[in-house]
Every structure is written in structure tokens, then in C-alpha cells.
Amino acid sequence: MARKNNDDAVLEITPQLLLKAYACGIFPMSESADDPHLFWIEPEHRGILPLDGFHLPRRLARTVRSDHFEIRVDSDFEGVISGCAEPAPGRDNTWINTEIRRLYGELFELGHCHTVEAWREGKLVGGLYGVSIGGAFFGESMFARERDASKVCLTHLVARLIAGGYRLLDTQFTTSHLERFGTIEVPKADYSLLLEDAMRCDASYFTLPPDATGEMALAVLEGAGTRQA
């Protein structure tokens, strides 16, 4: 949450400082939800999902096209970050503490933090959130309370980023789940070049409308040459 100098004065992390850190390839995390402190991370190898290399499983494409979930954008940030902080299989604790909620909530109000949300029968059943700067989108976390909810949100996110002219989708780390969709790991030096290029780009998160249908998202992906398997 803060760093101390020799005089024990507290330097608060502000949304503006956070944006500068992201632009330099650094992001914060916490040890647990109960830990009030944050620490900075700059991985030697970074996870990215190349927007021209997104893998879309055919079964998932059918689910996206069916509009089984109502997809919304930026309608319930608090609901999404709370969902991301919930316990999940293989994860009993979360790094999303009170300070993370505060900082990213303020970024959301400033228009630098965005969500993609899956709703069904009036309930939020999945979603993701991340930070947008220039032509880079830094994915933070995702959750699902129903099968495929977060996967459909990821598909809509990739389509939205492609339509908006983004150049970089940063996943921070790689996981077996993300690798199925084309996420790769790149050395820090290569990542820095990709980030620098993306920072020079003026992308728009809302080129696709907030209520874009699955058919609209798939049309963008097909136009970009997305591979289906």
C-alpha cells in the first residue's frame, strides 16, 4: 500500500502513480486479502495473448454465437472485482485486498479500468477486469460462476480490443487455461518493446458497442483471422 523513507513518511500509491507503473511494465499485488500492503512486480518473463493469435475452440464459438449469456461492459465493477476475489478451485485465498479495490475502483472512475461481464437471468455469473492505457490492455483477473462464463467474456474482450485498435493484451503470467487460447510467454526485453509500441497507439475500448452480441464479436474475430479448433 505504501513505501516508507528514512523519515517514516508514508508515500501513498495513487491511481496516477499506478498508471505510470503499468506504462513501465510494473504492476502491484498483495500477499492476501487480509494483507494491507502492496508490492511491485516486474516479471522476467511476461504472459501475453497475441491478438492475431487468439485460439477459439469451436464449441466455445457456438456458445458465444448463441448469446447464452448477456454480455455487458462496465456496468458492475464492484460485482466483478468481488467475483474475482472469491475462492476458486485451487485457490483458497486472493491477492485482491482493500487497497487493490480502492485503486482499481478509482481507475474505473477515471476510465482506465474496464470490465466484460456475463449475465444470465439478471445475475452476474462471470466476468473480467483490466487496465487500459493507450493501445495496451492489462488483464487483471477473471471469474466464473457458471460454465464458460469467463471464457465467453475473454472472447468478447479479444474482439473488443481488435475492433478498437489495441496492440497488446497483457495477461501478466501464463497458465494452462490461458495457453489454450494462445497465451505465450515472452522475455522482459521483448515485452518492453511491445509495450512501448502499444503506448504510442490511441485505441478505443468502445468501438464495439457495450451491448455487442456474440455474432458481432465473432465477426470481428473472423475478420482478424482467428483460428478455431
Image (cartoon, grey):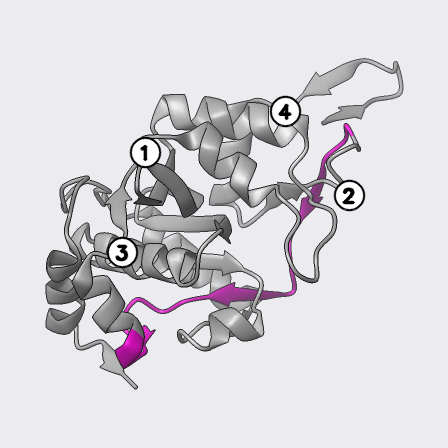
Residue 47 appears at what percent x and percent y? Answer: 52, 65
**Residue 26 higher or lower than 191, as above or below:** above
Queried whether the magenta region covers residue 51, the answer comes back as yes
Provide the secondary structure element on which disc 3 rests: helix
Where disc 1 sits, the SS reads loop
Do labels 1 and 3 touch, CB within 8 Å? no
Q: Amino acid at mark 3?
A: His
Badge 3 crowding class, 10 Å Cα cut-off, few under 14, some 14 to 19, many 20 or more, is: many
- Residue 148's quadrant in the figure? bottom left
Q: CA distance from mark 1 to mark 3?
A: 13 Å
Mark 1 or mark 2, earlier in chain: 2
The residue type indicated by label 1 comes to Asp
Q: In the image, is 161 to the left or to the right of 179?
A: left
Q: Amino acid at mark 2?
A: Glu
Nearest to viewer (mark 4 / mark 1):
1
Q: CA distance from mark 2 to mark 3?
A: 30 Å
Q: Position of residue 169 (x, y in %)?
A: 39, 58
Real-space Cα distance between discs 3 and 4? Answer: 31 Å
Task: Name the element at disc 2.
Answer: loop
Q: Nearer the viewer, residue 87 or 218?
A: 87
Is 21 on the left or on the right of 42, as rendered?
A: left
For disc 2, the marked residue is: 31
Q: Secondary structure at mark 4?
A: loop
Image quadrant holding the N terminus, namely: top right
What residue is drawn where x is 30% and y is 54%? 157
State which region is magenta.
36-59
**Spatial separation of the CA atoms under disc 1 and disc 2:** 27 Å
Above or below residue 219? Residue 108 is above
Residue 53 in view (yes/no)? no
